[in-house]
C-alpha cells in the first residue's frame, strides 16, 4: 500500500499502511490466586522463576501446563497475563479461611492470571481444564472466571 499526502494530512507525516488483521473466537479464563508478600515483591522485580518456586503458584502452573489448549497463539504458546492486586473479604461463619479469621475483614495479595482457549474447545474439555485449576486452588472458594466467546484481534 502506498501512502499519499493530501492537504488534510500535510504536516502529519505519511500515513501508516493498514495491517491486515486476524479475528479469532476464544474464551478467557481468569484465575484469582493468593500469593505471599514476598512472592509479590519477587514478581514485581521481574523474577519469572518464582512462578515455579512458590509452591502454591507451582500448583497452578502444573494445572495450566497439563492443559496445552490454553494460551495458544500460534507462534507463541503458554501465553498468559499476570495482574497484581489485593483482594478484600470477610470470612463468614462456617468458613475455614486460608488467611484471616472468621468475622474479620482481611486483605490478601492476589495475582490474576488470564489466558485464552479457542472457543471451539468442547465443553467437557473446558470443564476438565477448570477442574484441574480448582483442584489446585488453595482457597476454600476459588474465584475462576470463564468468559463467553469473545474475539481476539491480532495481525494476520
Image: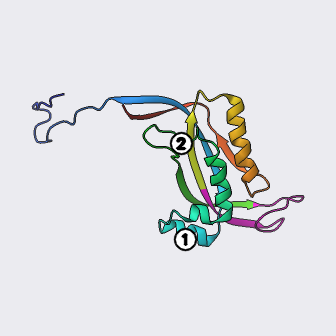
Q: Do the residues labelled 2 and 1 touch (CB within 8 Å)?
A: no
Picture coordinates of residue 70, whole percent (x, y): 58, 41
The residue sitting at 58% across, 51% down in the picture is: 113
Question: Relative to 141, is 13 above or below?
Answer: above
- Badge 1: few (under 14), some or many (20 or more) residues near its Cα, within 10 Å? few
109 inside magenta stretch: yes
Left or right relative to 5: residue 129: right
| Residue at the far right in the pictured view | 94
Residue nearest the viewer, comparing 75 with 83: 75
Question: Relative to 117, is 57 above or below?
Answer: below
Question: Relative to 93, is 18 above or below?
Answer: above
Q: Give the total number of marks visible in the rendering.
A: 2
Tell me the residue that label 2 is attached to.
71
Picture coordinates of residue 14, whole percent (x, y): 14, 38
Q: Earlier in the sequence, mark 2 or mark 1?
A: 1
Residue stretch in magenta: 90-111
Question: Marks 2 and 1, Cα distance to the nearest angstrom?
Answer: 25 Å
| Residue at the far bottom in the pictured view | 38
The residue sitting at 64% across, 59% down in the picture is: 58
Left or right relative to 68: residue 21: left
The color scheme shown is: rainbow
Residue nearest the viewer, comparing 100 with 73: 73
The image quadrant where one finds the N terminus is top left
Picture coordinates of residue 41, whole percent (x, y): 55, 71
Q: Residue 41 carries which label?
A: 1
Residue nearest the viewer, comparing 148 with 43: 43
76 inside magenta stretch: no
Amino acid at each position: 500500500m502506498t501512502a499519499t499526502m493530501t492537504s488534510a494530512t500535510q504536516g502529519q507525516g505519511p500515513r501508516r499502511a493498514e495491517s491486515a488483521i486476524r479475528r479469532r473466537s476464544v474464551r478467557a479464563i481468569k484465575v484469582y490466586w493468593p500469593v505471599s508478600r514476598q512472592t509479590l515483591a519477587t514478581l514485581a522485580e521481574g523474577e519469572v522463576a518464582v512462578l515455579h518456586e512458590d509452591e502454591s503458584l507451582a500448583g497452578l502452573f502444573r494445572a495450566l501446563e497439563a492443559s496445552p489448549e490454553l494460551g495458544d497463539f500460534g507462534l507463541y504458546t503458554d501465553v498468559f497475563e499476570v495482574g497484581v492486586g489485593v483482594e478484600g473479604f470477610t470470612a463468614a461463619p462456617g468458613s475455614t479461611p486460608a488467611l484471616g479469621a472468621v468475622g474479620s475483614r482481611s486483605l490478601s495479595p492476589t495475582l490474576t492470571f488470564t489466558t485464552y482457549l479457542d472457543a471451539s474447545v468442547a465443553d467437557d474439555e473446558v470443564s476438565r481444564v477448570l477442574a484441574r485449576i480448582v483442584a489446585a486452588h488453595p482457597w476454600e472458594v476459588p474465584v475462576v472466571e470463564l468468559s463467553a466467546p469473545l474475539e481476539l484481534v491480532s495481525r494476520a
